[in-house]
Image: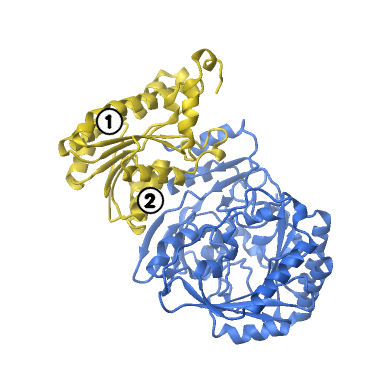
Chain colours: A blue, B yellow
Amino acid sequence: MTGQSAAAARKQLAVSPPITRILSWGRYPKTAHRFVHKPAWNDQVPEILRTAAPGSLLPYGLGRSYGDSCLNAGRELIDCRRLNRILGFDESIGLLRCESGVSLSDILDVFLPRGWFLPVTPGTRFVTVGGAIANDVHGKNHHCAGTFGAHVRQIALHRTNDGLVICNPETNSDMLHATISGLGLTGVIAWADIQLKRVAGPWIDAESVPFHSLSAFLDLTRESDGRFEYTVAWLDCFAGKNLRGIFFRGNHATGRGKEFHVKRGPQLPFALPSWTLNRHSVKAFNSAYYAMHAFKRKAAALPYDSFFYPLDSIRQWNLLYGRQGFLQYQCVIPETKLEAFEELLDRVARSGMGSFLGVLKQFGSAPAAGLLSFPRPGLTVALDFAMRGERTLRLMQSLDEVVEQSGGALYPAKDARMSPALFESSFPQWRSFVPYIDPKMSSSFWRRVTEAQ
Amino acid sequence: MKKVVILGATSGIALEVERQLARRGCELLLVARSPQRLAELQGDLAVRGAQQVFTHAADLACVQQHAAIFEFARRTFPNFDTVLLAYGSMHDQKDSETSVDTLLEELQVNFVSATAILTLFAAELERRRTGCLAAITSVAGDRGRRSNYVYGSAKGALSLFLQGLRSRLHPAGVRVITIKPGPVQTPMTDHLPNAAHFADPEQVARDIVCALERRSPDVLYTPKVWRYVMKTVQEIPETIFKRLSF
């Protein structure tokens, strides 16, 4: 009735072949896992931890991390997606208590009709609460709301040696701080208290404004950040120093607006052949995309899902990049190093390998919610690169040089290849995180960037 | 369908059914073994829109507890109109071949106890001349297979029991639905090979809720394709079938 115990499952693992179907969102690297635990109830988690070998486990959610931070090659995962219950909701203040496998999509479905919205949302709704905390994700409102972790009031954490640990700003605040942005390494989150945000309805008053230079982008940011809760820009990364893009900004509409239903779009059924995405097709796409928005510059009321989650309308869009998958490069560069930023874009443009997902945003100055939080004051850019072997990796290495020299940082949730040295310079405080790691936890990412076993 | 009793409320398929019923604002009575899990579930379903959620912790495999379960339902949830039996157990077939205790336990959980509790609720609905009884059996019950015939025979026997019960309750206007899912991704089947290709429990639950709401069918195969697959499987002559190893 309840499936197998963790011990019985592990016995079976001796004979079963490695599990190769679990990949991260970028579908690179290709890894095999020894076993995937699927607890359906929180009371099953302690036994999984207890019977595991040291450094053998990692919690896994919806697998939207792009690189290897959600993978544990050759070892085991704890798939938390069945831990998806809402444990309580205080309607008077909008405080939600839910298990870690609840998705942001689920929260929106249940609470948006009642007038509550996520305090912070990344560019996809298909991430779990556990994943949002572990990566301390940010969104278009970073300049006024900070990261997701800033809205986590309390968590309960399964730890191998300490049982269920309650962490909030009063008790175990250091563990709370480490778990937010802790990449799942501090334990399995049993449940978390999240502060939701009151909204009038599901509509966003949005504007799109074309821009033609970095200084124009900065002006738009300066002008908009006080007036708009959400700001982000799309970037044509083929343009190089002659930067061009579209600046999107919006606020929650104050009226309820008319009814609407979330559309579930088409799904890519299989990985496209890799030749379909090439320099010319992507360039054409970027020009068309730019023209479309440049000509219809105006304000409009958009449904929240097309404003926040345009890519979610094509499920499995990651298959666009073919069987070899793709890499995402998201870095932050201090505002004082604008020339470094231009150099970075120039290198991308000259390589001709850029793609249609260039996203640009200026982070706010809110203090980091977690010990290893990525957002910090500066300009952040996220770029996709189809994986084409050595030359893709070489390009990214040349971008690394720029980031490192400028004193910037790379985002672990998007990374599959940064060097230990760049991790060190991005997160010089990482050694103070080590004592918080649960003895049973490890990840492909962590072993790679810290050169640990 | 507004007031639903779920027997085996913490089983993988039941969890999805309950969620969809909650969204429709149904009232629920959940019966399962673990009081702690029931409490978590109760909170979840209440937030998701269930009008009211009652819980009763009991071991449905133990027939001695049935009278108390039934009494609780009649007392606290007197106007229930639908009963869904959703529990089951699937041991490794090999264990049932070597241990008679395991074999009997498998039959006890999947068949004996199920018929016992259904009989209590059937009498009540028959007396009231209204309502719906549904039970989850399995496509495994449509033909005995080498790899899974113990579970299959218990579920097949339950399907036969429901067939007769349906005929008995028909004059009273009480519906009896036999639900035959193919393999579904739940904790019960995680250890089986190819579990990643099994049906999505959400889809299966959608079919079940749909069948509970409508007047047909009497026998639900979910996902639908299994109706035709099993029809074909049943047509294979025994002389050939006995040589197949699946």
Q: Where is residue A371 in the image (x, y as percent from the top left)?
A: 60, 67
Q: Circle 1 — which element?
A: helix
Other-residue count near label 1 (Cα within 10 Å), few / some / many at <14 / 14–19 / ≥20: many
Left or right of B226? Residue A238 is right
Q: Which amino acid does label 1 sit on?
A: Arg
Left or right of A351? Residue A333 is left
Q: Which amino acid does label 2 sit on?
A: Gln
Residue at image mark 2: B20
Task: Give the chain letter at badge 1.
Answer: B
Viewer-side label of 2, 1: 1
Numbered mark located on residue A234 in the image = none
Residue at image mark 1: B166
Front residue of A437 and A19: A19
On screen, residue B70 above or below A387: above
Other-residue count near label 2 (Cα within 10 Å), few / some / many at <14 / 14–19 / ≥20: many
Q: Where is residue A317 in the image (x, y as percent from the top left)?
A: 63, 56
Front residue of B225 and A378: B225
